[in-house]
Amino acid sequence: MLKYTLRRILGMIPMLLLISIVVFTLALAMPGDPFGGEIDPNNTDPEYIEQKREEAGLNDPVLVQYGRWITNFVQGDFGESTRYKMEVSALIAEKMPNTLFLGITSLVITYILAFAMGMYAGRKPYTAADNLIGGINYLGLAVPSYIAGVFAIYFFAFQLDWFPFSGSVDIQVENGTFEYYLSRLHHVFLPAIVLGALGTASYTQFLRNDIIESSRKDYVRTARAKGTPESKIYNKHILRNSIIPLITFLGFDIVTLISGAIITEAIFTYPGIGMLFLDSINTRDYPVMMTLTMMFSFLVLFGNMIADLLYGIVDPRIRVD
Amino acid sequence: MNNVLDATQTHETTSSKTNQETLLKVSNLKTYYPVKGGFFKRTVGHVKAVDGVSFELKKGETLGLVGESGCGKSTAGRTILRLLNPTDGEINFDGEDITKLRGNRLREKRKDFQMVFQDPYASLNPMQMVGDIISEPIKNYYPRKKKKEIKAEVMELLKRVGLPDDAYTKYAHEFSGGQRQRIGIARALALKPKLIIADEPVSALDVSVQSQVLNLLNELQDDFDLTYLFIAHDLSVVKHMSDRIGIMYLGHIVEIADKNTIYKEPLHPYTQALISAVPEPDPRRKKERIVLEGDVPSPENPPSGCPFHTRCPMAVDKCSTIKPELKEVRSGHHVACILVD
Amino acid sequence: ACNGSDDANATDDEEKTEDTGDTGDSGEDTGDEGSDEEAEGEPQQGGTLTYALDAAPEGLFHWNWYGIVTDAEVLGLFDDNLITFDEELKPQPNIASWETEDNKVFTFTFKEGVMWHNGDELVVDDWIFSLETLAHPDYDGPRYSNVQTIEGAEAYRNGEADSISGIEKVSDYEVKITFDKARVNNLLNLWTYPMNRTEFEGIEVADMEGSDPVRRDMVGTGPFKVNKVVPGESVELVANENYWQGKPNLDKIIVKVIDSTAVTGALENEDVDIVAVHPTIGKDVEAMENVELRTAPGLSYYYVGFKLGKFDNEAKEVTEQKDKYADKQLRQAMMYSINRQEWIDAFFGGYGKVVNRPVPTAHWIAADNSELNTYEYDPEKAKELLDEAGYVDTNDDGFREDPNGDEFVVNFAHYATGNPTFESRAKALTQYWEEVGLKSTLEMIEVNQYYDMIEKDHEDMEAFFGGWGYGADPDPSALWKSDQLWNYPRWVNEESDQLLDDALDVEVVGTDQEKRKDLYVEWQKIVNEELPMLFITELDEIYGVNKRVGGLTLDVSGMNSPHEWFVTE
Amino acid sequence: MAELLENPQMKKMRRPKSMSPWAVARRKFVRNKLAMVSLFFLLTISILSFLAPYITTADISRVNIGQMSLEPTSEHWFGTDKSGRDVWTRLLYGGRVSLLVGISCTFLIIMFGTLIGALAGFYGGFVDNALMRFTDFILNFPLLVFVIVLNAVFFGKLGGVSVLIAVISVLGWGGVARLVRSKILAEKENEYILAATSIGSRPTKVILKHLIPNVLSTIIVQATLTFAAMIVVESGLSYLGFGVPAETPSWGNMLSASREADVLQNMPWIWVPPALTLTITILSINFIGEGIKDALNPKSLR
Amino acid sequence: MSHYTDFQSQPSLLEVKNLETAFEIDGEWHNAVDNVSFSVKPKQVMGVVGESGCGKSVMSLSIMQLLPKNIGKIRNGQILYDGKSLEKLTDKEMNKVRGKDVAMIFQEPMTSLNPVFTIGFQLTEAIHNHFKVSKKEARKKVIDLLNKVGISRPEKVVDEYPHQLSGGMRQRVMIAMAIACEPRVLIADEPTTALDVTVQAQILELLQDLQETNDMSIILITHDLGVVAETCHEVIVMYAGEVVEQTDVISLFEKPLHPYTELLMKSIPRMDREEKNLASIDGIVPSLKNMPRQGCKFVDRCPKAMEECRTVTPGLGEEIPGHSVRCLLYESSRTQNEVTAK
Ligand SMILES: Nc1ncnc2c1ncn2[C@@H]1O[C@H](COP(=O)(O)OP(=O)(O)OP(=O)(O)O)[C@@H](O)[C@H]1O
Ligand SMILES: Nc1ncnc2c1ncn2[C@@H]1O[C@H](COP(=O)(O)OP(=O)(O)OP(=O)(O)O)[C@@H](O)[C@H]1O
Ligand SMILES: [Mg+2]
Ligand SMILES: [Mg+2]
């Protein structure tokens, strides 16, 4: 297992290198640079900006720029944000917890809802409740997250005033106290629901269909034939089989959540990686943009690996050792 | 039963079972499947599906190939038709070595040997109408042939295999298993081949239907001067169909002989066990069953020496070390067992 | 602050109007405006006020390093400037007062007993420390130009001297600063923010930008102290009991970022007390019962520029003339054809004024409209001018051809962000021109690329939309002199160059502000006549303020000092 | 044999017309009410959008300062937006763009994905390896992230609907290729593929005539899913300002008006129509997709 | 066990009376099992033969009350086990019967085991469903069972997953599972069809052994007449949901009465004989929807069909003592028909 994981990780390196070339090329091809907007005639002058460009190495030959960037990059030096004037790594470290928290909450909500609804609908297919769940799911699949987000803010934050509409925490609570975490949860709930809606819908649907399909399998008949109670058949025999593909989705979720966070965070002004990414594009903050793009790509690779590993772990048929 | 097609039209030789001309000669044929290991998909080993098979097939004769599931029967059949590439050995068809043929030359050759498949459901394209299925081989080789002519030929074939005319515009799923197998046979016949390899053509069928197909195959052999390589796992069916029978075990032919010889005087312990295991529909007859222990070993790492020694009731020590050759112990009776002389 | 007045407020994307940002004068005002008392009556003590930002701060909470307006807004709440500016943007003493005789040597005197939040007393050394930091070779921020003119700064920066020779400490509360030469705007250009020496002790200048005193544990002299920062979203400030102008009324100020979509909702639900609002929702805010809309004249203006030539950045001169818009009558006609008031009402809710010069009305050098051509909306006049200039429809396609009879198309460019209103307001301008017979096209260009193209005089840039912000220093040279990169129209006019030089020349103006203003008025008349760019509008600064907030005043220099703010229950 | 032909049972089994698998699916689909209603809706929207220039008279690009933000009236069915443009007109024109982007992307993605997937799946070995590594490479670019980056690169000068389509398509085909490959691999196991080779069909014919038709149902279902997803992607990008240029109406662009607080709260007629149309369109496509999936699934009931 | 025992006099252990099981197709209910009656005596091996689709599996699923919910139901008839009407039991009560009194093994050893649980788990579950025993005891019992069904190294196999076993081993596991609670009746639905002859021989041998040592009754469903001949005491021949012939195994093979049975026997190639042409039955079993409502269901395929076969529905008559047949060629069938008609 460990050996396999290590080899998988090694196998990512060439792919990441290729991606880095693409990312770098794209950054190079982007019009404008971070110093274009920084005109402040009373405080600076064109020479200062030109000097900054020179310092940032933007006038060096392309290959030199790439070489410098990638060498630093693999050493963990992602450069300094031209906008925030701080280490990109520190900047990401600052935003990351928020996004992680959002992602994990959203995942938890997704899984809880999907399991509850999916199992119920799968056990009682073609009933009114199943149809209702199906209807909700279709809506969840169809309503784009930004529409859902805008509606959610409109109703739950403004009309009903149940949830805050922005931010990640109430500044007035003491760090680390119970209220603090409560406040974070309170803030993250709405975006997490919106972010998780799509996943919830597809998981529920998947689980339902898989349960229905599984319940027609021969081994279920076998279990019945030996006198296993119905509840045990669903909760053990069928569920265990349906969970396997679902668990492996977890790997892919990492990716979905991160890119989903871009839109959701923008709508809820939730200061995380997604907002940072959009910001970095708008302000041509190349070090941040390139690092994040690389990070997202890495996460895709990583997510796929996790999916494969999980699959190997949970499915006895293809257990890897 | 009338000849609906004029058989002489395609075959100059009026072959009969007495014709001793060799049509197919297979020598030391080996086909290995690579085993891809782990997620890195590297070849970590080989499934030795066919591991040194040799036999000859005379024109007009039927050779039956029996063996348990996974012993390499289909692989052997497909390799001979060059649907798979042999790992080693030689396939000589009608005096020509076809082992190394490729591309168009192979395609040209294909006209002469055809296959009937096991699964009447999976071997017909569900998206094609029966007419298209049967005319496709003709269109492939005679692209300039007129549509009308082709259609006439197909209609003849339909009639010949006992399908109604309106089958032409129907889809395979509208037919029963036996009828589908007839469609498959018609397709194989369309190019008027010399050799037909029938890969378990009846094992997916009910007994009542199975006999229809067997009868049909028998009739067609006479009418079209066909040579059959008949693959099955059911000994009684093979015996019914064949002139000679080869018994396969784990990629090897362990015994090959005339069908009555095989039935009456099996020499290889495996053949003996196989024959004794076939249940006979006669409640009065008491026969002694030789029940073999265990299952067929995996062809991925076959036992050393004689492949059968792990299950053989008569095995002696040297069976695990000496790999027996297929020897002709009597005229026309070949056995691969060191205990047999 | 550096003019948050651009309409980008509507979205979280920044619209990059280049700010002629002043030196960060926001958020304070001397207490000498006592006459301007609020109707709410007596200030109440205690309470928490929520102040909303519409964009996330970058988190560089020090005057010497901050980069964007939002950070400055926060800075204004907890750190005071040594000097301040009045309603006409003229400098006034605050913590420090000054004297000069020749505009070259200035003597500054600090108030005694002004305390830093950490308990240190503010003395001139703090300021000297700040100035030396900016002049330090390792200083990486944009503000070296604010100390560059001090005598000896250059040498210090080059490592030739251990201190700046032009700075002479007289006592703890008095310092003499000598500039390299006398200028009229030496004071305005000078950096007037001190740095707390204890906090920065032991931190190399190169590391200061990322250090805690800049990002987390900020220490200022202002009415509020920073208690806690949640990066990118909120800041909590508590009253500074020892504030030199007296204890603030409020206990706390919460600064938090909200999305512009949430502004009205937040105001209505009383989630925020003060927030800058976009002109388009001004009417809605005005209609709210619990909220008052406060406006103040803004310092930025929008224009339509023409590329009249090409600039060579090496030679620092305009090297090539472009003919397309060279005809003054054409430019004037295009100006006449725009109904600017209608446009402002339509796209800025009327919260702006028609402007005819490159100086905001509130500025003390602004020429009075009576002295200028006001270019009232007059399409007939426009047509007349065009006819006169030879732009007539010769092929009956409904549009005018140029004097040579070739097709004439106004190719107008506007920057694009996510903001959907940009397109329509730009489109509206082209429609005005089409109405007088000038065929027009519109191209929306991504904002980063847009300014790149303008700066590099890209072929496709012919007529373009832009905005400039104005600071306290009236000197417009950087934007208008023919040897300046940021003279985007590439307008060359010797008279203008001369006037701008004269207005800065102590030989010419001495210390007489009126004389200086006269020169600028003269210059504005030329620009107004020549129209290298069509001036469209100056916008108001508008804020939604909850009615429970008292003691807040707003003028062109920004809000008054927050220690005077209070909330009623 | 003759006996068999005479057999009355055989005669009885003959149905008047034989149904191709497609015909069977079509019949099943037509019986699916939800899918039919959805199809009807989608067709209506498409036709209306397509005919927008003939149906509507208002100028989509003209800014009408005198008629800004009007509530719905008989003259302006859905009112006007903040630029005084007729919302109904823009909705139709917006549909043109959104559907065009959706369809074009779907078409390109499916074409390319199918091509790569089919080649990889059919030939296996080295071809498979090379193509799949390439596919992995493409799949490793998170779509949204890279479309945003790429669009930032091309925005402005090159900007426009075609660039958006190209960018999305170039990045989007990986999933389809993988799916098609796996389906082809499974389908290849069927003996009729072997049969096709044995009767002398050339590889191209095997792929086009035997493999593709049999995985077509998967591809069609995937296409509907892709279609819905692409409309979401387009509108989401436009909403964020990284999609279709602002001057071109699209549903996402129209919706981005809701980012202005006053529009969101006080002028629902500006953003609700595109929001609803978009949602219902996506819903319809999903229902149609489900319908097709059901219809093409021989195991499904009815 | 093929030695002839007189079962007639014994009381029946499992009795099926006039069983009718129907499926809903296109909104209509069609009988897949039509008026089937038979009884199984203690220690008897009852064979059920017939072509694919003739209702063998549906019949056994009906006995086990395992019909797919909603689309399949028992319309009529009784299933008496030890005097208990199984079809009247609730799910919960039936769970007590399944596995303990009546157990079943299925045709497909490959898919009938849950792929994600160990063999041990699945076997222990069968025991835990009916007995309260500790985990340790259960495990011991499982190992014993595996031993009993002839699996070598049972200690290892308990902890293995189904995919690690071969088809024959899996079928043995299925059998072990079925006999875990020592049921009195074992229904084996084509237990060897998917297996090779040599393995089939092993399994049949095993079933015979178990039947004798455990005193079980077995209902052995198969389409292989050879298997029937070698293992069964009594045989039912089914066609299109009906029993067409029923007798002991010797009589059936020596003197098949029904034309269908006769043809069936003649259509199998025999090892011990040489025949040029095999008999065949044309056509196929009519599908449920196309089932004739009247007359003999075999009429369309029957070489001996008469005019009246299309109109007169034959009954199952005892032509010779202990030998019943459903065909108008036989008087008893006609009369039986008249009896049921009344
Ligand atoms: N494509 C393949 N890749 C790898 N192994 C294969 C492949 N096809 C067959 N095998 C293996 O090769 C061996 C022989 O297979 P083959 O299909 O020839 O057996 P068979 O005798 O025809 O069996 P059956 O009676 O089940 O058809 C088996 O062990 C099988 O698992
Ligand atoms: N779930 C079902 N829904 C509808 N019809 C069914 C269902 N299960 C079985 N049938 C029908 O019932 C009839 C009897 O089927 P059954 O499975 O009992 O046949 P069988 O004799 O066991 O055949 P085989 O030998 O193939 O197992 C068939 O016509 C079949 O189509
Ligand atoms: Mg085979
Ligand atoms: Mg069955």
Image (cartoon, grey):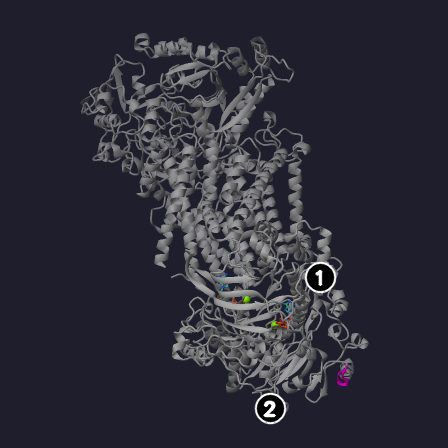
- Start-end of magenta stretch: E329-333
Q: Which residue is mark 1?
A: B158
> Does the magenta-highlighted stretch encompass residue E332?
yes
Q: Chain of mark 2?
A: E
Membership of C355 in magenta stretch: no
Left or right for C176, reference A18: left
Distance of mark 2 from mark 1, alpha carbons? 52 Å
Q: Is residue B94 above or below residue A74?
A: below
- Rendered-image quadrant of the C terminus of chain E: bottom right
Chief secondary structure of the magenta span? Answer: helix
Q: Locate residue D247: give its quadrant.
A: top right
Front one among B70 and C208: B70
Report the residue at 66% width, 78% height from top.
E275
Which of the two residues, C488 or C421, is positioned nearer the viewer here?
A: C488
- Ligand 2, image quadrant it occupies: bottom right
Dot 2 corresponds to which residue?
E5
Query: Could you tell me residue B292's position as x and y percent?
Result: 48, 79
Secondary structure beneath dot 1 equals: helix
Instruction: Kindly state the secondary structure of the residue where label 2 is placed.
Output: loop
Say the numbered circle drawn on residue C222.
Answer: none
Chain to which the residue tagged by mark 1 belongs: B
Tell me the quarter of the image containing the N terminus of chain E.
bottom right
At horizontal 48% and vertical 57% (from top left) the residue drawn is A246
Give the quarter of the image for residue B66.
bottom right
Q: Is residue C280 left or right of residue B281?
A: left
Question: Considering only vertical position in the picture, is A317 above or below D72?
Answer: below
Q: Position of residue C120 (x, y in %)?
A: 22, 33
User: In the image, what residue type sits under mark 2?
Assistant: Thr
